[in-house]
Image (cartoon, rainbow, N blue to C red):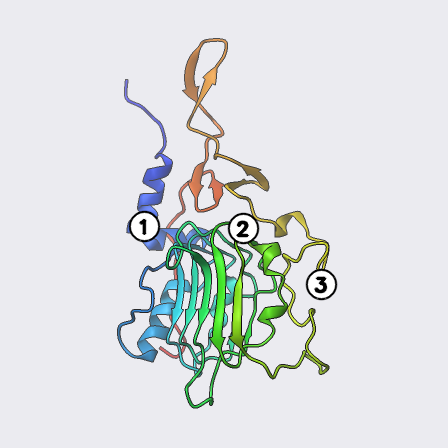
Amino acid sequence: MRSSRRPGPFLCLLLLLCRPELAAAQAVCAGTLNGLSVTGDAQHQYQTLYKMYNNCEIVMGNLEIVLIDHKQNLSFLQTIREVTGYVLIAMNVFTYLPLGNLRVIRGTQLYEDKHALFVLLNYHTNGSHALRQVGFNQLTEILAGGVDIERNEQLCHVDTIEWRDIIRDPLIDPVVQQNGRKCECPGGGSPGPCCLCPAGDGPGSPCARNLKPQDLACRHFNDSGACVPLCPQPLIYNKLTFQLEPNPDTKYQYGGICVASCPREPGRGAPADA
């Protein structure tokens, strides 16, 4: 008798990797594994970044933003809320990094085998342009790996974030050093611990706030708002018949979430100035 089972989770994931356009229906996109290596000029780098991450919510892999100049509009990055690998921000000269909706970095891959978040050398040598602010105000969880933010000459307030409240591993110490020194809080006043506060601040931190359930990240998978170790499997054991039977509520692993079906074909735009 021919089986009528639906595609398994590994087939679903394979389809996403081979045909990234399928993932856009669920706003999932593939990441990169280039490190500090780049091809083409700054404009090519930007166009590639836009095509990969415009309308993206979940990056399956690593988010690498390298060698982007100060003229580019990066507002399309605001939709990203989860990265399964690491986040690398290096050698850019834009002023603001708009990752305001990024909530979780899973760290399934780590930069240099230890960093889930690595921010390095984001300034022009003549001081004319540099990264001054990162928008990590919704970042709640780094599930594996550490944080290294250093040698960003004009980057402000990153040392006011309670990184230990965000990093899951209590044995990892964040490295935040040699960044901007002449910083002012928004609206004036001297720098203090509340200049920049991600939603992941713990109850004892100066910027503590009440977190909503949807602001927290699941260690394994999110199944309709519930944290579960596995998504509902295709077969379940029937204790009465002592047999495995099809599970009508089966779901597929899709990044850090459980979905009832593989995504459908979407449409995707291009930069207005392309």
Residue underneath mark 2: 171
Sooner in the amino-acid sequence: mark 1 or mark 3? 1
SS type, badge 3: loop
Quadrant including the N terminus = top left
The x, y position of residue 223, in whole percent, is 54, 39
Q: Is residue 13 above or below residue 49?
A: above
As drawn, the label of residue 17 is 1
Q: CA distance from mark 2 to mark 1?
A: 34 Å
Q: Nearer the viewer, mark 2 or mark 3?
A: 2
Q: CA distance from mark 1 to mark 3?
A: 40 Å
Q: CA distance from mark 2 to mark 3?
A: 23 Å
Sooner in the amino-acid sequence: mark 2 or mark 1? 1
Q: Is residue 215 above or below residue 254?
A: below
Residue underneath mark 3: 207
In depth, the one of 141 and 163 nearer the eye is 163
Q: Of the residues shown, which amino acid type is indicated by label 3? A: Cys
Quadrant including the C terminus = bottom left
Mark 2, Cα crowd under 10 Å, few <14 / some 14-19 / many 20+, is few
Residue 140 makes an appearance in the image: no
**Residue under the point 56% across and 56% down:** 103
Q: Is residue 88 above or below residue 126?
A: above
In depth, the one of 261 and 8 nearer the eye is 8
SS type, badge 2: loop
Mark 1, Cα crowd under 10 Å, few <14 / some 14-19 / many 20+, is some
The x, y position of residue 183, in whole percent, is 62, 81
Q: Of the residues shown, which amino acid type is indicated by label 2? A: Leu
**Residue under the point 58% across and 81% down:** 181
As drawn, the label of residue 133 is none
Sooner in the amino-acid sequence: mark 2 or mark 3? 2
